[in-house]
Amino acid sequence: MSEQSPPEDARAECADALPGLADALPEYAERVLDVAERIPPGRVMTYGDVAEWLEEGGPRQVGRVMALYGGAVPWWRVVRADGVLLPGHELRALAHYREEGTPLKQAGSGAEGHLPRLDMRRARWDGGAGAEDHT
Protein backbone atom coordinates (compact mmCIF):
# COMPACT_ATOMS: atom_id res chain seq x y z
CA MET A 1 0.00 0.00 0.00
CA SER A 2 1.36 3.40 -0.82
CA GLU A 3 1.80 6.04 1.83
CA GLN A 4 0.00 8.64 -0.27
CA SER A 5 -3.12 10.51 0.83
CA PRO A 6 -6.56 9.94 -0.66
CA PRO A 7 -7.23 11.97 -3.80
CA GLU A 8 -8.02 15.63 -3.23
CA ASP A 9 -11.69 15.11 -4.15
CA ALA A 10 -11.97 12.47 -1.42
CA ARG A 11 -10.37 14.85 1.08
CA ALA A 12 -12.81 17.57 0.03
CA GLU A 13 -15.79 15.26 0.58
CA CYS A 14 -14.40 14.30 4.00
CA ALA A 15 -14.03 17.98 4.83
CA ASP A 16 -17.67 18.58 3.91
CA ALA A 17 -18.84 15.60 5.94
CA LEU A 18 -16.59 16.13 8.95
CA PRO A 19 -15.35 19.74 9.13
CA GLY A 20 -11.89 20.07 10.63
CA LEU A 21 -11.09 16.36 10.38
CA ALA A 22 -10.05 16.02 6.74
CA ASP A 23 -6.67 17.65 7.33
CA ALA A 24 -6.16 15.43 10.38
CA LEU A 25 -7.19 12.17 8.70
CA PRO A 26 -5.33 9.41 10.55
CA GLU A 27 -2.67 7.62 8.53
CA TYR A 28 -4.44 4.26 9.03
CA ALA A 29 -7.68 5.75 7.72
CA GLU A 30 -5.87 7.05 4.64
CA ARG A 31 -4.51 3.57 4.01
CA VAL A 32 -7.94 1.93 4.40
CA LEU A 33 -9.54 4.47 2.05
CA ASP A 34 -6.75 3.91 -0.48
CA VAL A 35 -7.54 0.18 -0.51
CA ALA A 36 -11.26 0.89 -1.00
CA GLU A 37 -10.41 3.06 -4.01
CA ARG A 38 -8.25 0.29 -5.53
CA ILE A 39 -11.01 -2.34 -5.50
CA PRO A 40 -12.16 -2.71 -9.11
CA PRO A 41 -15.80 -2.06 -10.05
CA GLY A 42 -17.84 -5.24 -9.69
CA ARG A 43 -15.55 -6.66 -7.01
CA VAL A 44 -15.50 -6.46 -3.19
CA MET A 45 -13.22 -7.00 -0.21
CA THR A 46 -14.37 -7.79 3.30
CA TYR A 47 -13.42 -5.63 6.26
CA GLY A 48 -11.09 -8.43 7.33
CA ASP A 49 -9.57 -8.69 3.85
CA VAL A 50 -8.66 -4.99 3.96
CA ALA A 51 -7.05 -5.34 7.40
CA GLU A 52 -5.15 -8.43 6.30
CA TRP A 53 -3.96 -6.70 3.13
CA LEU A 54 -2.74 -3.74 5.17
CA GLU A 55 -1.16 -6.13 7.69
CA GLU A 56 -2.58 -3.90 10.41
CA GLY A 57 -5.78 -3.66 12.44
CA GLY A 58 -8.75 -5.92 12.08
CA PRO A 59 -12.28 -5.94 10.65
CA ARG A 60 -13.65 -3.68 13.38
CA GLN A 61 -10.97 -1.05 12.83
CA VAL A 62 -11.60 -1.08 9.08
CA GLY A 63 -15.35 -0.87 9.71
CA ARG A 64 -14.85 2.12 11.98
CA VAL A 65 -12.77 3.92 9.34
CA MET A 66 -15.39 3.20 6.69
CA ALA A 67 -18.18 4.42 8.98
CA LEU A 68 -16.39 7.68 9.75
CA TYR A 69 -14.66 8.49 6.45
CA GLY A 70 -15.90 6.03 3.80
CA GLY A 71 -18.42 8.31 2.11
CA ALA A 72 -15.65 9.78 -0.04
CA VAL A 73 -14.71 6.42 -1.61
CA PRO A 74 -16.61 3.46 -3.15
CA TRP A 75 -17.77 2.29 0.30
CA TRP A 76 -20.06 -0.37 -1.15
CA ARG A 77 -16.98 -2.38 -2.21
CA VAL A 78 -15.91 -3.00 1.42
CA VAL A 79 -18.39 -5.49 2.81
CA ARG A 80 -19.36 -8.01 5.46
CA ALA A 81 -17.86 -11.48 5.04
CA ASP A 82 -21.30 -13.11 4.87
CA GLY A 83 -22.31 -11.07 1.81
CA VAL A 84 -25.25 -9.40 3.55
CA LEU A 85 -25.78 -5.86 2.31
CA LEU A 86 -24.86 -3.08 4.74
CA PRO A 87 -27.86 -2.48 7.02
CA GLY A 88 -29.40 0.91 6.43
CA HIS A 89 -27.68 1.31 3.07
CA GLU A 90 -28.97 -1.78 1.28
CA LEU A 91 -30.79 -0.06 -1.58
CA ARG A 92 -27.99 2.42 -2.30
CA ALA A 93 -25.43 -0.38 -2.28
CA LEU A 94 -27.63 -2.62 -4.42
CA ALA A 95 -27.92 0.11 -7.05
CA HIS A 96 -24.11 0.35 -7.19
CA TYR A 97 -23.72 -3.44 -7.38
CA ARG A 98 -26.18 -3.70 -10.24
CA GLU A 99 -24.58 -0.79 -12.10
CA GLU A 100 -21.12 -2.37 -11.73
CA GLY A 101 -22.22 -5.94 -12.45
CA THR A 102 -21.16 -7.25 -9.03
CA PRO A 103 -22.15 -10.92 -8.68
CA LEU A 104 -25.22 -11.35 -6.47
CA LYS A 105 -27.17 -14.30 -5.10
CA GLN A 106 -30.93 -13.88 -5.29
CA ALA A 107 -32.65 -14.00 -1.94
CA GLY A 108 -35.02 -16.80 -1.14
CA SER A 109 -38.65 -16.01 -0.41
CA GLY A 110 -37.94 -16.43 3.31
CA ALA A 111 -35.15 -13.82 3.35
CA GLU A 112 -35.91 -10.62 5.20
CA GLY A 113 -36.80 -7.91 2.69
CA HIS A 114 -36.08 -10.31 -0.18
CA LEU A 115 -32.78 -8.54 -0.76
CA PRO A 116 -30.03 -10.42 -2.57
CA ARG A 117 -26.65 -11.10 -0.99
CA LEU A 118 -23.28 -10.66 -2.59
CA ASP A 119 -21.95 -13.81 -4.21
CA MET A 120 -18.72 -13.70 -2.22
CA ARG A 121 -17.14 -16.62 -4.06
CA ARG A 122 -17.35 -14.72 -7.34
CA ALA A 123 -17.23 -11.09 -6.20
CA ARG A 124 -14.35 -11.21 -3.72
CA TRP A 125 -11.16 -9.49 -4.88
CA ASP A 126 -7.83 -10.69 -3.50
CA GLY A 127 -5.96 -7.47 -4.24
CA GLY A 128 -4.20 -9.09 -7.18
CA ALA A 129 -4.04 -7.41 -10.58
CA GLY A 130 -3.62 -3.67 -10.33
CA ALA A 131 -2.69 -3.76 -6.67
CA GLU A 132 1.06 -3.42 -6.95
CA ASP A 133 2.98 -1.54 -4.21
CA HIS A 134 0.36 -2.24 -1.58
CA THR A 135 2.62 -2.35 1.47
Image: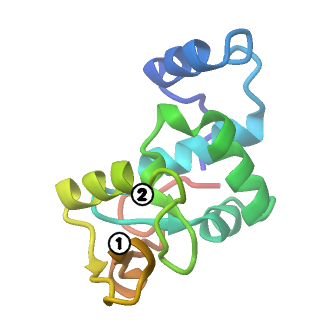
| Quarter of the image where the C terminus is located | bottom right
Q: Quadrant of residue 121?
A: bottom left
Q: Residue furthest top?
A: 20
Q: Is residue 77 placed above or below 52 in the rendered structure?
A: above
For the residue pair 11 and 38, the one nearer the viewer reads as 11
Tell me, for residue 57, which label it has, or none: none
Asked if marks 2 and 1 touch (Cβ < 8 Å), the reply is: yes
- Could you say where residue 10 lies in the image, as x and y percent from the top left? 49, 25
Q: Which residue is mark 2?
A: 90
Residue under label 1: 115
Position above or below: 68 against 40: above
Residue at 55 percent across and 20 percent down: it is: 11
Counting other residues with Cα less than 10 Å from the Cα at mark 1, is it few (<14), some (14-19), or many (20 or more)?
A: some
**Residue 58, image x, y percentages:** 78, 64
- Picture coordinates of residue 49, whole percent (x, y): 61, 70
Amino acid marked by disc 2: Glu
Query: For the residues marked 2 and 1, what is the alpha-carbon distance in whole angstroms?
Result: 8 Å
If you read the primary sequence from the N terminus, does the residue marked by circle 2 or circle 1 appear first? 2
Q: Toward which corner of the image does residue 16 lie, by quadrant? A: top right
Question: How many numbered callouts?
Answer: 2
User: Which of the 4 quarters of the picture holds residue 102?
Assistant: bottom left
Asked if residue 82 lies left or right of residue 23, the reply is left
- Residue 129 lies, in percent from the top left, at 36, 66
Residue nearest the observer in this picture, 36 or 68: 68
Which residue is found at the position 28% from the left and 63% from the top?
42
